[in-house]
Image: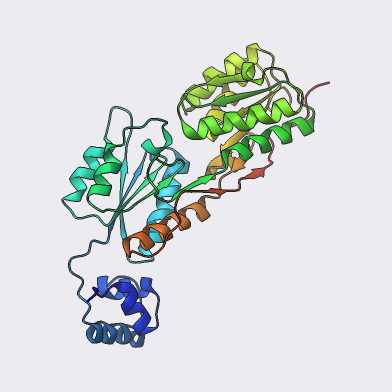
Amino acid sequence: MAKVGISDVAARAGVSEATVSRVINRRGVVAMATRRQVEEAIRELGYERGGQSQLVVVLTPGLAQPFFGRLCELIESALASQGFRALVGSTTVGGLQEVDFISSTMDLGIAGAVFASASNTLVGADPTVYQLLVERKIPFVLVNGSIEGQPAPSFSTDDVVAAELAVDHLWGLGHRDIGLIVGPAGNRPSERRLTGFVRSMSARGVADPQRLVVRQVYSVEGGMSAAGTLLDQGVTAIVAASDYMALGAIRAARRRGMSIPQDLSVVGYDDSQIMDFVDPPLTTVRQPIERIAQSVSTAMVHLINRKQAPSGELLFDPELIVRASTAPPHS
């Protein structure tokens, strides 16, 4: 006889699985009549919790970056609404290692794991942590990069389209010498943005767009360094692979006595919450962070409850947000 699960209880009680989880875990507000329906269904079906974990690990490369901090916050909130708790781990270079963190949390009993732009973004990443989860039959969901040979759901913004949107905007303003700042080689989102940039510039007849590309780390300092190289080449506009890089580009230009956007137009990426308040407010490509977080949490809960979830990578459309850091070039 098949084991009774939360989905069976929800169907018998005529409520959502999230409501059943709240009743079982005594979390959140549930109307007394609804609670009684759920409890009656539990008794009738003989449901046993059996120690099922409600803990989901969320791994990210750095909570100090506003975008990743906000993404984890939204995933945590979405999971909580369905009766699960999130344990967030920040995996930085030289710091916490994914496999160590996952191994230690397995002792706590985890229900699933989310890799939010973690090692899954790297081409040729060590598959050990993913193999460990598969062996333990612990489901996982990915953000910003899938793992070869693993059918786990993966959710990403369409980075190719994002770069094309930025180039379209700047070209429409009259810029022809447009530079791109991207992350290190082997980073999947960076490679996609590079593809979109080269494709868009080539389609407009620009010879060898690669000469206008500089790779750097995802930081303000990385943006400053890369922008210096591009400014030496005479660009009038810069597309940056993150908002922080864009802020670095603006700082580099100002240190040369340049004004934004009069002397240099800059486009960022992410649309972090503070970008509307920097000087000047940053034109950027927005990632649909709320939709991504909701999709991640829904897929995670479905996998935990052994229900059908998407497989492979799903891409979300980005949106260009035009503010005050872009303008036509000087004639």
User: Dividing the picture into quarters, in which one does residue 39 lie?
Assistant: bottom left
Residue shown at the point (37%, 57%) measured from the top left: 300
Which residue occupies the foreground of this view, 243 or 75?
75
Q: Position of residue 258 (x, y in %)?
A: 67, 19
Residue 278 in view: no
Residue shown at the point (15%, 50%) measured from the top left: 107
Q: Position of residue 264 (x, y in %)?
A: 69, 24
Q: Position of residue 89 (x, y in %)?
A: 30, 43
Specify how the rendered protein is coloured.
Answer: rainbow
Q: How many marks?
A: 0
Q: Is residue 195 above or below residue 28?
A: above
Q: Is residue 17 left or right of residue 218?
A: left
Q: Is residue 200 left or right of residue 155?
A: right
Residue shown at the point (41%, 46%) measured from the top left: 142
Which residue occupies the foreground of this view, 29 or 53?
53
Q: Is residue 104 above or below residue 180?
A: below
Q: Is residue 283 above or below residue 205?
A: below
Instruction: Spot the residue most to the left.
Output: 107
Which residue occupies the foreground of this view, 78 or 244?
78
Residue 187 in view: yes
User: Dividing the picture into quarters, in which one does residue 60 lie?
Assistant: top left
Instruction: Spot the residue most to the right.
Output: 331
Residue shown at the point (26%, 35%) measured from the top left: 97
Q: Where the N terminus falls, by quadrant?
A: bottom left
Q: Where the C terminus falls, by quadrant?
A: top right
Q: Position of residue 120 (x, y in %)?
A: 39, 38
User: Dividing the picture into quarters, in which one does residue 28 lie?
Assistant: bottom left
